[in-house]
Image (cartoon, rainbow, N blue to C red):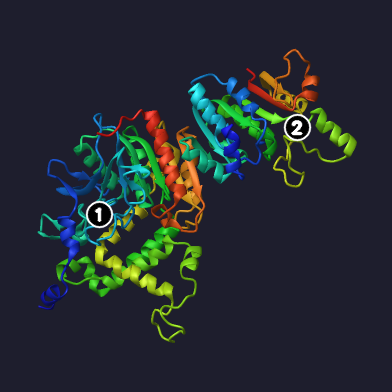
Amino acid sequence: MMAEANLKSTPQQETPREADEPRDSRLVRFGADKPLKLDSGVDLSPFQIAYNTYGTLNADRSNAVLICHALTMDHHVANVHPVTGKPGGWESMVGPGKPIDTDRYFVIASNVIGSCMGSSGPASTNPATGKPWGLDFPVVTIRDMVRAQAMLIDHLGIDTLFAVVGGSMGGMQVLQWAASYPERVYAAVPLATATRHSAQNIAFHEVGRQAVMADPEWSGGRYLIEGTNPRRGLAVARMGAHITYMSDAALHRKFGRKLQDRNNPTFSFDADFEVESYLRYQGSSFVERFDANSYLYLTRAMDYFDLAAEHGGVLANAFRKTQTRFCVVSFTSDWLFPTPESREIVHALNATSARVSFAEIATDKGHDAFLLDEPELFAIVRGFLGGAERSRGLSAAG
Amino acid sequence: MNMQTRQSELPAVNGARSTSGRVDLLVVAQMVQPGSRVLDVGCGDGELLKILTETKNVDGRGIEISREGVNFCVAKGLAVIQGDADTDLADYPDDAFDYVILSQTLQATSHPRVVLEHMLRIGQRAIVSFPNFGHWKIRLMLLFFGRMPQTANLPETWYDTQNIHFCTIRDFRDLCEELGIKIETAVALNAWGHKLRLNFPWWVWNLFGEQAVFRLSRRR
């Protein structure tokens, strides 16, 4: 009876509904005839992918750009987000006249498998039970996400993508695309990413997952069924992760040791410091839009990512004979995916004589720099895509 | 021309390459067969790659040590990576390119000999241009003033320069001999950027050539 009461008092607001029937999104459902073959050995079927498109596909279907989103982002890259009401997640990069120019390119952004914004994931309804999947949802990998995206691209009747672009977990998908479907990717732009998740990054993710699972309201992952909500655990996970997305210098620049709306410390455990208040806000706003189990699944997918391991331990083999042109970008203050990890990608690509550009951008904005206002990044992406467009002889959209 | 403006926009680019007398770029470009695969080591602001792409339709790549130079090149659509001739050439497989170019950079590397060996491992041919330290002006400065030479082409003081391994045309020929490298063609440019006559003997080149450009291949 308690559970029943809770279910009413804690309205299971946006998340499950958004997971099944995403607003402001296109949706493709793959039936029993088209299962998603997962690395775990499970066939996921039926399943669905939520996505958005911007711009127009040209007559020879050669101007499609796929955006791969980062961990907690989604396919609302250049439209108002239906859950938060905020601008799209990458409007600085994607839009008319922007570096990924929707006047020239047909931009596709899809929500990854395992997420909670409309593509099948742990918050989606399990067709077998009529209830949210929860932990019964199979564990997915970066390669599974990319397989699902390839099915979406097939569904859209697109053979070759002009470019695949993404940062962080999105960058992992970009690299996986180039390794799994080299003939379908003309240009690849992996930003602030790596070919494998480092031990330190797995460690950070584990702290986040443990925070979620330590919340009694997580209820063994059955919170959507039991009507509880592991807000505190997920918020703590987000607070910890958010620190890793910024740099010490940026935190110092933004907050320093400034106190929040007070002149003196309160000698309590209130959010005395601005930085504490900021993190609490980041945590609490995150839980309004994200599903705790999805957070577990997606962090896991990143942890499992190791492109060299898929190719006999030799990274260069992942890109052997690739014709794809690459633009790898890292940021000086990114300590989550530091420059040496991008350099490893570049070394592997050099070893295969691939056509690669690699730039490191000086910024104090940390890992998140790829999503922020970085004019040098915009110039590089615009210039790289322009060069690729010329060599591809791309015809205009429309 | 606009190369000069670019250079002034980018003061940090290209410490090793001199900012004047870029006639050597055109001489280098003339030595490249159209449609070939080219790696430009120390490509600076990408001017040579741009010339080669536009006039010779090459498949060009670059390595540049300065971040500003790299980002400038990539934003122009050139395939350039941030890297160091001394450390990053080792990653490339044998015979990956038709030409590996090192323009006005050899004297700034820590291990010119190793760099040269890598160039001819990675590429069928290597094209190297460098300032000739045997030029008469440089000899006179050392002889009469007893100071490290500073010229319009090499304006930095000895304590500021990135050029740590100067050589003369004669020295360079000796190194090629020692490494079993074949000199296919060579050009010396005088102070005005004019080519010295081909029938001049090497010692004239070594005295009057301010810059030298060599095209090299492996001796079979």
Estimate the x, y position of residue B104 in percent, counting from the top left: 66, 33
Give the amino acid type for the residue marked by disc 2 in the picture: Cys
Vertical comparison of A150 with A50: above or below = above
Q: Which numbered disc covers residue A114?
A: 1
Indicate the quadrant containing the C terminus of chain B: top left, top right, bottom left or bottom right.
top right
Dot 1: chain letter? A
Q: Is residue A92 left or right of residue A360?
A: left
Dot 2: chain letter? B
Most foreground residue, B51 or A232: B51
Other-residue count near label 2 (Cα within 10 Å), few / some / many at <14 / 14–19 / ≥20: some
Vertical comparison of A88 with A322: above or below = below
Most foreground residue, A76 or A16: A76
Distance Cα–Cα, label 2 vs label 1:
61 Å
| Residues at circles 2 and 1 in contact by the CB criterion of under 8 Å | no
Indicate the quadrant containing the N terminus of chain B: top left, top right, bottom left or bottom right.
top right
Inspect this view and state whether residue B94 appears. Answer: no
Most foreground residue, A92 or A270: A92
In the picture of the structure, the residue carrying the numbered disc 2 is B167
- SS of the residue at dot 1? loop
- SS of the residue at dot 2? loop
Estimate the x, y position of residue A280 in percent, counting from the top left: 35, 72
Estimate the x, y position of residue A53 in percent, counting from the top left: 24, 44
At a point 43% along the width and 55% down the height, the residue shown is A369
Give the amino acid type for the residue marked by disc 1 in the picture: Gly
Foreground label between 2 and 1: 2
Estimate the x, y position of residue B3 in percent, counting from the top left: 58, 34
